[in-house]
Amino acid sequence: MTMIKKAFKAFTYLSGHRDPAPDITSIRPSGFQKKIIFFFIMASAIPAIGRAESLPASAGEIATEMSSDSCISDHAFPGYALNHQNFKEMQAASHFKKQAKMLIAMSEHEQAVRSHFAKGQPIDWKEVEETDRKNTRDFKKMIDKEGLFALSQVGGDAVAAEFHLIQRSHDIPFQRSALDMMRHMLARQDFPGDYVAILEDQLLARDGKPQIYGTQVKKDGSLYPVIDKDQLDARRASHGLAPLREAICPLSKTE
């Protein structure tokens, strides 16, 4: 369990926030730990149910639903796997292929500057922050010109990259604006609902408010506060998320 917590702690610091755990540089992962940490990093590359996201309050305080060897799983409600695979298989429309490639390239670059930890190497956090800022600037220019991109435009892989870029941004007003656009596209069934749920919860938890879908999880496996727990699974299902009992280990608890 200690090994998992260290890997989990290390991963949460990789989210790009500037409030690291004070002893992060002292962690020297073993080969097995490196595999766990690498899995966490790769999980953040393609956000889905249980994929990694930026931390709402401070680094190391909030985790998210992600596939891992920890107590979190990505078993979804019936039919989700097929639906999400269909999303992933959606290709960019011919007149949006350039934009799709740009989104994926930006996301891959962002992941690359954070990947050194998995190899036991130090991370250049100045480079990480500069990359995040540049990605946000470039991404905002694209959105200002063409709007947020939908599944029917850039395809599943690029939408996953797009969501990843939104999460990594340190620009909270930009994230809120993106969330509004994501909601409109979801209403047209042209954007993954779980992405909307994760970002909405992330912003709520960051503001110290109860989350709606229960996607924000502390390091100890307990949820940050949620509204109306009795209807939580219904809200989760409406956005393509697994029932809470299938997503979080039995040791987790709601507040």
Image (cartoon, grey):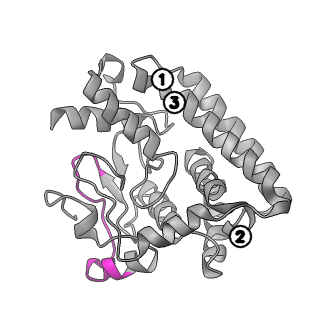
Q: State the residue in front, 23 or 233.
A: 233
Q: Where is residue 58 in the image (x, y as percent from the top left)?
A: 41, 42
Question: Where is the N terminus found, in terms of image quarters?
Answer: top left
Question: Where is the C terminus found, in terms of image quarters?
Answer: bottom left
Question: Which residue is denoted by mark 1 in the rendering?
Answer: 116
**Which residues are the magenta region?**
218-234
Disc 3 residue type (three-letter): Arg
Q: Is residue 150 left or right of residue 66?
A: right
Is the C-beta separation of discs 1 and 3 under 8 Å? Answer: yes
Residue at x 61% of width, y 73% of height: 183
Q: Where is residue 212 in the image (x, y as percent from the top left)?
A: 40, 71
Question: Which residue is denoted by mark 2 in the rendering?
Answer: 152
Residue at x 73% of width, y 53% of height: 100
Disc 3 is placed on an element classified as: helix
Q: Quadrant of residue 188?
A: bottom right
Q: Residue 114 carries which label?
A: 3
Disc 1 residue type (three-letter): His
Pair 3/2: label in front: 2
- Residue 224 covered by magenta stretch: yes
Q: In this view, does 110 lie to the left or right of 218?
A: right
Is residue 181 visible in the rendered structure shown here?
A: yes
Disc 1 is placed on an element classified as: helix
Q: Position of residue 107 (x, y in %)?
A: 62, 42
